[in-house]
Amino acid sequence: MEVLRLYDPGRRPPSWTEIVRAGQFVAFSKHIDSGGPCDATGRPFASSAEIACLLFDRLDEARGFCDERVLHAPSVRFDVYDSAGRTSPPLLTIVHPSRVATLEGNPRGIRMRKRAAIALTVGALALFWFDYWKSGGMLILPTILGINMIIIAARLIQLNASHAHAERERLERLAQAAGADVRSA
């Protein structure tokens, strides 16, 4: 593991992305609550010139280090990227086990959005039924509310689908990175 400062005007090459070789992995740490960058122990950087990432030669080494660090600093989140850097979503996002529910796309959130979409759809159907069969289609408000409920339900379903797609892509990239990591060992 190597600590690599992101902004170092005296370094050649000046960009940190030009230092990372194919097959290496970088981990960025930040506070879960504020999203501000911090070191691996959870201390915020004093200035933007001190911001650094951690450079690893192997994916399992990066995962092990980050898993160990979040146990000692539960407020820290690690995002692990491949050698392409932040051009794609992280291969791994590592947080303390008590903070997994705060991650976007977590299984609990997906289940809750799915249940909410079902409830909204059922509620919209009930409003349509009430408007057209009970009142003879004379009320407009239940239909307008029902249409809005259907739109919200569709948005929740679309959000779950986008999380599932992003997770599939992440798992494919992770498998490729792990395969390359095993071949280079």
Image: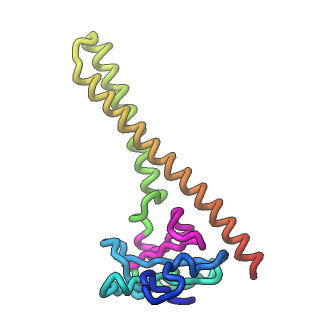
Looking at the image, which is closer to me, 87 or 144? 87
Q: Which residues are magenta?
A: 75-99
Looking at the image, which is closer to me, 184 or 139? 184
Q: Which quadrant would residue 118 be assigned to in this image?
A: top left
Residue drawn at 44 percent across, 47 percent down: 159
* Horizontal arrangement in the rendering, residue 19 relative to residue 98 (left or right): right
Q: Taking 106 as reference, is 143 above or below it? A: above
Residue drawn at 39 percent across, 65 percent down: 102
Q: Which quadrant would residue 138 be assigned to in this image?
A: top left
Q: Taking 166 as reference, is 123 above or below it? A: above
Residue 86 on the magenta span:
yes
The image position of residue 132, as x and y in percent, is: 31, 14
Residue drawn at 45 percent across, 81 percent down: 6
The image position of residue 50, as x and y in percent, is: 38, 87
**Quadrant including the N terminus:** bottom right
Residue 16 on the magenta span:
no
Q: Which quadrant would residue 10 be assigned to in this image?
A: bottom left
Looking at the image, which is closer to me, 47 or 147? 47
The image position of residue 184, as x and y in percent, is: 75, 79
* Horizontal arrangement in the rendering, residue 121 relative to residue 92 (left or right): left
Residue 123 at least partly seen: yes
Q: Taking 31 as reference, is 89 above or below it? A: above
Q: How many marks?
A: 0
The image position of residue 51, as x and y in percent, is: 39, 83
Residue drawn at 34 percent across, 26 percent down: 126
Looking at the image, which is closer to me, 176 or 132? 176
Name the colour scheme: rainbow
**Quadrant including the C terminus:** bottom right
